[in-house]
Image: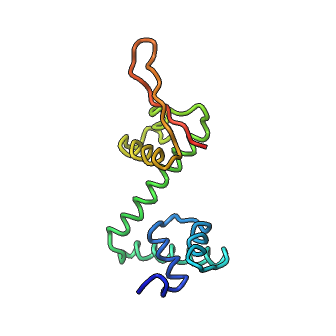
């Protein structure tokens, strides 16, 4: 069955499975792009109901673990991205890698921060400048800033 034959509610559910944290505005834009329309209240209602259903299925272990794990990983990835972007936007002069790690109370894997910074740079949301080390000859520092 093609997407053109699916109901609008089914399309919203597919969007939520793809991105559990998708906003009502993003759902609305996707529907309009497909020539469909629902009021924001209706979208919000379907979104809330379906996310509740997914949580129940997960809690009862009726959703396959890979899907539940993927949903959790996507949520965590988005949380890390949001935290870093907020930190960069709040610091116009930029943040070093150490300062970014401190946004998470030094409780986030370096590899996760590195991957997130690379993704933000690829999306044009952040940029990195390398600054010379201190007067004692320390290694160069990465300073990350948000792209406005």
Residue lying at 54% horizontally and 37% vertically, measured from the top left: 145
Residue 137 appears left or right of 34: left
Residue lying at 44% horizontally and 54% vertically, measured from the top left: 77
For the residue pair 37 and 74, the one nearer the viewer reads as: 37
Q: Residue 2 lies in what quarter of the image? A: bottom left
Residue lying at 40% horizontally and 72% vertically, measured from the top left: 58
Q: How many marks?
A: 0
Q: How has the structure been colored for display?
A: rainbow
Percent of width and height locating residue 114:
39, 42
Percent of width and height locating residue 111:
35, 43
Q: Taking 66 as reference, is 82 above or below it?
A: above
Residue lying at 38% horizontally and 68% vertically, measured from the top left: 68
User: Which quarter of the rendered picture does the N terminus lie within?
Assistant: bottom left
Percent of width and height locating residue 54:
45, 74
Residue 48 seen anywhere in this rendered image of the structure: no
Q: Taking 114 as reference, is 54 above or below it?
A: below
Residue 11 appears left or right of 62: right
For the residue pair 80 and 1, the one nearer the viewer reads as: 1
User: Which quarter of the rendered picture does the C terminus lie within?
Assistant: top right
Q: Residue 57 lies in what quarter of the image? A: bottom left
Percent of width and height locating residue 126:
52, 42
Residue 116 appears left or right of 34: left
Residue 29 seen anywhere in this rendered image of the structure: yes
For the residue pair 35 and 51, the one nearer the viewer reads as: 35
For the residue pair 8 and 110, the one nearer the viewer reads as: 8
């Amino acid at each position: 069955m093609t997407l053109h034959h699916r109901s609008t509610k089914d399309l919203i559910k597919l969007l939520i499975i793809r991105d559990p944290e998708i906003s009502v505005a993003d759902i609305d834009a996707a529907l309009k792009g497909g020539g469909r329309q629902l009021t924001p209240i209706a979208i919000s209602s379907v979104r809330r109901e379906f996310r509740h259903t997914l949580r129940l299925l997960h809690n009862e272990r009726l959703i396959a673990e890979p899907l539940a794990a993927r949903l959790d990983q996507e949520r965590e990835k988005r949380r890390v991205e949001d935290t870093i972007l907020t930190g960069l936007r709040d610091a116009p002069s930029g943040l070093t890698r150490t300062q970014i790690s401190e946004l998470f109370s030094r409780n986030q894997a370096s590899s996760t921060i590195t991957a997130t910074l690379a993704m933000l740079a690829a999306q044009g949301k952040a940029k990195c400048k390398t600054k010379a080390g201190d007067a004692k000859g320390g290694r160069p520092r990465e300073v990350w800033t948000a792209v406005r």
